């Protein structure tokens, strides 16, 4: 049953979007969707003009870190068909994160109704082609103005939009992080919480100092086994076209929706796939002997991004310039968006 949503109109966008010159995540929608949780239940929700939030300096999320977010995309095909890709999976992951942070579950009817009404108010943001998208950003956080280490009793869910092009313009270099740790078993590695990304920023600076754009994280216990990039899950392609990606079993890796889509496409292509632990030493040895021919990252923002090289132990390990498996899977991914290749019918949610 659809949730009751109040609509407050915002002024029209003052300037047209120049899609070919679009920076990632710098232009925001004119509207945002807002829902508040208090007195043990979700209150009436609204779509309102995009504006600053009024929060107490004592807001619980600022002190104790009950804050999480999601990111997914809406598209428009050349024939005008508008859709969101895999919104239910992102809602499920949002609630997985919420459970880990002891936050109330967001009902699906509330989530999808907010999203639907927000997109209807922002149809001008839909891009003219599938090279661009609307990036959807739900952010969910505690709002109690109270100092005390306990779960908040009040929360706010805000959803807003930003029109985007590619997150990365070219192939990228990755810095293998051998000192800092991202997540440990039993921790919050599977949750898309704000603090995980703050904890990665220092490694990001180290990466930039070495001419790299992302960090590749290793396990927290031994700094031996590969986990994921700072912004993406990771795949390795062997010479025989076998795909290897780290297993989710340790509970330290974000369960990427794009990762899951790429696994589906790989199986559809008949590729061999191994979800298992892989050590950085195995990776380096296999690059050296030509047994690993491609490395790529997957994520909502980046989709599929080939890696040009790894910086590990003060040495650059180059990958071959051609990435046929990554490009094939990216072509298949785009074919699903275009409606030319069938995936799970629930993945395409019409607007």
Image (cartoon, helix red, strand yellow):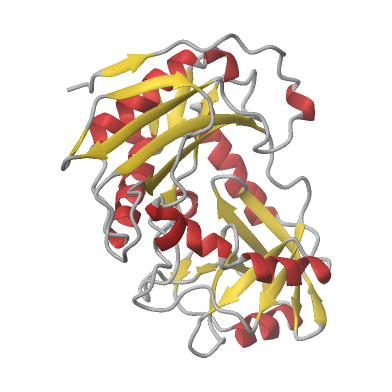
Left or right: 188 in relation to 307? left
Q: Nearer the viewer, residue 101 or 52?
A: 52
Left or right: 190 in relation to 281? left
Q: Quadrant of the C terminus?
A: top left
Image coordinates of residue 95 in percent, x first then y, are 30, 49
Q: Quadrant of the N terminus?
A: top left
Q: How many marks?
A: 0
Can I make out residue 309 in this image?
Answer: no
Image coordinates of residue 32 in percent, x first then y, are 47, 26
Image coordinates of residue 316 in percent, x first then y, are 82, 77
Q: Residue 102 falls in which quadrant of the image?
A: bottom left
Q: For the view shown, which residue lies furthest in the bottom direction?
A: 222
Q: Nearer the viewer, residue 282 or 289?
A: 282
Image coordinates of residue 89 in percent, x first then y, are 35, 44
Can I make out residue 36 in this image?
Answer: yes
Residue 306, above or below 85: below
Residue drawn at point x = 24 percent, y = 46 percent: 105
Residue drawn at point x = 32 percent, y = 29 percent: 112
Residue 90, above or below 288: above
Residue drawn at point x = 40 percent, y = 30 percent: 348
Q: Nearer the viewer, residue 227 or 31?
A: 31
Q: Residue 294 falls in which quadrant of the image?
A: bottom right
Residue 207, above or below 327: below
């Amino acid at each position: 049953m659809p949730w009751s949503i109040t609509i407050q109109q915002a002024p029209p966008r003052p300037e047209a979007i120049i899609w070919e010159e679009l920076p990632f995540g710098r232009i925001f929608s004119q509207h945002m969707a807002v829902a508040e949780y208090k007195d043990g239940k979700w209150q009436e929700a609204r779509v309102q003009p995009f504006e600053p939030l009024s929060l107490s300096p004592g807001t619980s999320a600022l002190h104790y870190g009950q804050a999480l977010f999601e990111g997914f995309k809406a598209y428009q095909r050349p024939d005008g068909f508008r859709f969101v890709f895999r919104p239910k999976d992102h809602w499920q992951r949002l609630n997985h994160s919420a459970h880990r942070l002891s936050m109330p579950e967001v009902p699906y009817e509330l989530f999808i109704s907010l999203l639907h009404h927000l997109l209807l108010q922002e149809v001008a943001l839909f891009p003219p082609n599938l090279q661009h998208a609307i990036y959807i950003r739900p952010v969910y956080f505690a709002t109690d103005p109270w100092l005390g280490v306990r779960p908040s009793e009040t929360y706010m869910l805000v959803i807003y939009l930003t029109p985007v092009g590619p997150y990365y313009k070219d192939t990228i270099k990755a810095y293998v992080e051998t000192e800092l740790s991202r997540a440990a078993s039993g921790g919050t590695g599977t949750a898309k919480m704000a603090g995980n990304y703050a904890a990665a920023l220092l490694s990001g600076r180290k990466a930039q100092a070495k001419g790299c754009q992302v960090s590749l994280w290793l396990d927290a216990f031994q700094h031996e086994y590969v986990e994921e990039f700072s912004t993406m899950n990771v795949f390795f392609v062997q010479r025989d076209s076998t795909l290897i990606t780290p297993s989710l079993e340790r509970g330290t890796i974000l369960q990427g929706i794009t990762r899951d889509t790429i696994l589906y496409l790989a199986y559809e292509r008949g590729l061999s796939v191994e979800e298992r632990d892989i050590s950085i030493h195995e990776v380096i040895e296999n690059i050296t002997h030509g047994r690993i021919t491609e490395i790529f990252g997957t994520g909502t923002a980046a989709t599929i991004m080939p890696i040009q090289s790894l910086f590990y132990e003060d040495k650059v390990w180059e990958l071959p310039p051609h990435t046929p498996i990554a490009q094939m899977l990216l072509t298949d991914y785009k074919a699903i968006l275009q409606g030319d290749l069938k995936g799970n019918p629930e993945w395409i949610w019409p607007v």
